[in-house]
């Protein structure tokens, strides 16, 4: 679907060309995650998705007509809609703007400019910030990437302390597409998670990541059942048949994820997985069976399942003194998982003597949806600089006495490394500018997906 970007804005912004000083010929704005959000740094990611989806398409006559009609309905007048400026954009075939941004994948302290946008034609200056709304949508993938990075950084020392880092890339799996507010949200949020983890059932995100960043096969998943499969066999003997069917049909070296709580999770482990025939079949496989309790208190049920599996299959102590299940079995927790509960669950099993290597998790709403808004990291886009027809240069700044954390930056900006510290400074300050042009007058810069992934891992 082609989006009409003239309408992808707040209605009142279409009136701003009538409000600015009449002699303004250039406007310059920047975007940042302001101080005071949930995290002190952000994992900068997603601007390429916005540019890919919206800044490659031209403005058409049909878009202008539609926007004029909707503006008239909204304002009850045609006087506010600047048809002339959008006709000029249509004639150009692109937005007359220049966008500079930090390299995606960087971890950036809050309070720094993440990107800038400036007009490149005099006549577009007072319409520049109509593009604010669509650019602001970068808050979402950056916030999701930041949350996933927080989880990864929290889990890494737990894996290092109690096992290996082998499973860390797939320790947190994206189950979130169905719970996202839209397919596009699911794709963008899922792509943001893929910046830091590879476990994902979000195929839309995997495809989208490839389309935008040119990286194929970023996501990994496994043969996994759900309750509709489990309950189709029925309880009792049906549960035996259910597991045997998976063992019969899946490749011998495949990882199998088996949901176990359709009726009674602990009974399932004891009497189905623990039955002599199935136990032997699992032991003789090359691949691993991962059991998924899907209800109850994760910190209770997962330890119960681990202990039952230990009784059935045995354990060993690894070189760090933590218990490891037989290589043929493990568990995955897919219910109630978000950042804090994921970390807490790992800490719980570790406190009971288990290595982190025994567990992986899946997260849905807690990964892509629950509790995330633009204000999570206090994203804002603000004007910082203007030029006038008579050559004046104007530094623009918001500085409210009632909330100094909302003070904006003034003037032309650059972002530099001062030692190892990222700082936003005036353009005339010494130092190489980390902001690089990603879009200028219809031309998109090349995207290096592998470098973005590598940068995110640093």
Image (spheres, helix red, strand yellow):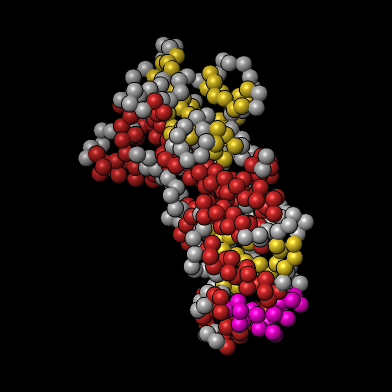
Q: On the rendered image, what quadrant is the C terminus found in?
A: top right
Determine whether 69 is above or below 259 in the image: above
With 341 as the anchor, is 211 left or right in this view?
right
Which residue, as the protein is rendered here, is positioned at the far left? 76
Q: What x and y, as percent, mark residue 107?
A: 59, 37
Determine whether 396 is above or below 193 in the image: above
Residue 68 sits in which quadrant?
top left
Q: Residue at x 44, y 32 (%)?
A: 381
Q: What x and y, as percent, mark residue 444?
A: 58, 37
Could you tell me what secondary structure mostly forms the magenta stretch? helix
Q: What x and y, as percent, mark residue 288?
A: 70, 70
Task: Say if residue 305 shows up in the picture.
Answer: yes
Q: Residue at x 66, y 60 (%)?
A: 354
With 114 as the anchor, is 11 left or right in this view?
left
| Near-viewer residue (454 or 315) | 315
| Near-viewer residue (352 or 405) | 352
| Near-viewer residue (270 or 164) | 270
Question: Is 348 inside the magenta-drawn segment?
Answer: no
Q: What x and y, as percent, mark residue 342?
A: 55, 55
Q: Residue at x 66, y 47 (%)?
A: 157
Task: Say if residue 122 shows up in the picture.
Answer: no
With 23 as the anchor, is 170 left or right in this view?
right
Q: How many marks?
A: 0
Determine whether 378 is above or below 249 in the image: above
Residue 174 sits in which quadrant?
bottom right
Residue 252 sits in which quadrant?
bottom right
Q: Residue at x 52, y 42 (%)?
A: 142
Question: Is 269 inside the magenta-drawn segment?
Answer: yes
* Residue range of the region highlighted in magenta in the rendering: 268-285
């Amino acid at each position: 679907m082609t989006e009409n970007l003239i309408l992808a804005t707040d209605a009142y912004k279409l009136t701003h060309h009538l409000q600015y000083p009449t002699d303004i010929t250039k406007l310059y704005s920047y975007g940042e995650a302001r101080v005071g959000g949930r995290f002190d740094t952000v994992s900068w990611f997603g601007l390429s998705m916005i540019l890919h989806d919206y800044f490659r398409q031209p403005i058409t006559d049909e878009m202008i007509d539609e926007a004029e009609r909707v503006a008239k309905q909204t304002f009850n007048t045609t006087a506010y809609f600047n048809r002339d400026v959008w006709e000029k954009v249509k004639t150009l075939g692109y937005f007359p703007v220049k966008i500079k941004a930090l390299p995606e994948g960087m971890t950036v302290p809050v309070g720094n400019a993440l990107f800038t946008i400036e007009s490149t034609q005099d006549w577009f200056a007072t319409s520049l910030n109509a593009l604010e709304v669509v650019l602001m949508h970068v808050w979402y993938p950056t916030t999701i990437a930041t949350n996933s990075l927080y989880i990864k950084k929290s889990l890494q020392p737990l894996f290092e302390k109690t096992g290996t880092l082998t499973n860390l890339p797939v320790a947190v799996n994206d189950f979130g597409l169905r719970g996202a507010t839209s397919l596009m949200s699911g794709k963008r949020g899922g792509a943001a998670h893929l910046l830091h983890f590879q476990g994902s059932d979000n195929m839309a995100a995997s495809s989208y990541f490839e389309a935008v960043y040119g990286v194929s096969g970023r996501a990994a998943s496994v043969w996994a059942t759900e309750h509709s499969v489990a309950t189709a066999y029925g309880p009792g003997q049906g549960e035996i048949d259910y597991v045997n069917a998976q063992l019969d049909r899946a490749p011998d070296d495949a990882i199998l994820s088996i949901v176990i709580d359709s009726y009674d999770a602990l009974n399932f482990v004891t009497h189905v997985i623990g039955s002599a025939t199935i136990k032997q079949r699992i032991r003789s496989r090359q691949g691993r069976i991962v059991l998924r309790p899907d209800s109850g208190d994760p910190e209770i049920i997962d330890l119960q399942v681990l202990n039952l599996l230990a009784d059935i299959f045995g354990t060993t102590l690894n070189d760090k003194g933590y218990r490891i299940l037989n290589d043929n079995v493990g568990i995955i927790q897919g219910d109630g998982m978000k950042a804090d509960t994921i970390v807490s669950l790992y800490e719980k099993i570790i406190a009971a003597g288990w290595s982190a290597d025994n567990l992986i998790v899946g997260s849905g709403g807690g990964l892509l949806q629950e509790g995330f808004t633009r204000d999570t990291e206090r994203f804002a886009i603000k004007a910082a600089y203007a030029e006038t027809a008579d050559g004046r240069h104007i530094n623009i700044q918001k500085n409210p006495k009632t909330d100094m954390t909302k003070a904006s930056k003034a003037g032309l900006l650059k972002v530099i490394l001062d030692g190892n510290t990222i700082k936003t400074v005036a353009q005339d300050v010494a130092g190489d500018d980390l902001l690089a042009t990603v879009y200028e007058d219809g031309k998109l810069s090349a995207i290096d997906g592998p470098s973005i992934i590598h940068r995110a891992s640093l």
